[in-house]
Amino acid sequence: MIEVDFDAHERSRWTGRARAYRRSFGRLCAYPTGALLDAAAVRAGRRVIDVGTGPGTVAAAALARGARVVAVDAEPGMLAAARRTATGAGLVGGALPRLPFPDARFDAAVANFVLNHVGDPAAALAELRRLVRPGGRVAVTLWPFPHPPLQRLWREAIDAADVVPPTDLPRLAPERDFPRTEEGVTGLLSAAGLSDAGCATVSWTHRADPADWWAGPAAGIGAVGLVVQRQAPAVRARIRQEYDRLTAGCRTTDGMLALPTAALLGAATVP
């Protein structure tokens, strides 16, 4: 599958879904924000670009540290949300691997759960490196594979409902893919010409209203959302029934879903 197909598909899964994202994935993706900004050495006075800002969570946190922030996203609905969340950030429409900024414009670049959604991760990292001055920092988060229990839940519900996922979903070309592990991320950063590369796993237990966690796939977000949306109404109802069954044993006394998850946090220095 060629790059434009993969990227176009990924962007289509987010179009018009900013509200559903905030309800389902938003709090989950916000969790590593502080660690991400620490890894990028974001502090007062630093020029920071937040690529794939979504609703502006990371950009707002960087502003709170006194940084000067530019936030970029390809989806107008996400930029509209970021305008409310990250007041004071410069907002720009754009997408990796080509962004409309000169070389070495920033002191740090951050991309929170963005590399999972680009057709050429190496090219995306090369662009982040281009935007940062020598001595500056690049930091990224992405989901690991194999998936943690929280993310496995949806596929388990689909399998339990006897639904076969479609085979025509765009996938990264093998030569562009990389292991979604600490070693794989470290290698990707180093291959982009960055120095002092490293990656750590950030683990936590995510708590969410089960209805909110279901809202993402129900709205068509991500590959699992596309699988759900392609089913007939009766099949979608069966997947939801299996989801409710599987989550019944993972709920706390207040009815909230509580499951372990993790993210990979990679960071490096521009030489």
Image (cartoon, helix red, strand yellow):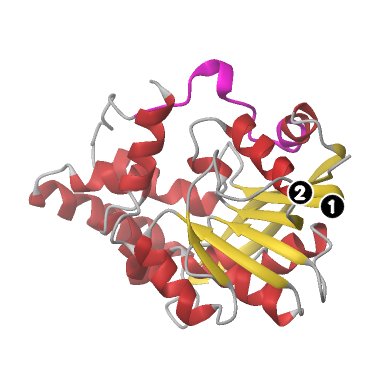
Q: Which residues are magenta?
A: 170-185
Question: Horizontally, is 150 left or right of 122 in the view?
Answer: left
Residue 169 location in percent, x, y? 32, 30
- Residue drawn 48% across the image and 42% down it: 117
Q: Quadrant of residue 107?
A: bottom right
Which of the two discs, 1 and 2, labels the residue nearer the N terminus?
2
How many numbered discs, if any?
2
Q: Which residue is mark 1?
A: 136
Residues at circles 1 and 2 in contact by the CB criterion of under 8 Å: yes
Q: Which residue is mark 2?
A: 104
Question: Horizontally, is 250 left or right of 10 in the view?
Answer: right
Residue 239 shows up from this direction:
yes
Give the class, few, some or many, for how many residues have Cα within 10 Å of label 1's Cα (few <14, many ≥20): many
Quadrant (top left, top right, bottom left, bottom right) of the N terminus: top left
106 up-or-down from 102: above or below: below
Instruction: Say which of marks 1 and 2 sits in front.
Output: 2
Question: Could you tell me the amino acid type at mark 1?
Answer: Gly
Q: Which mark is residue 211?
A: none
Residue 13 location in percent, x, y? 32, 48
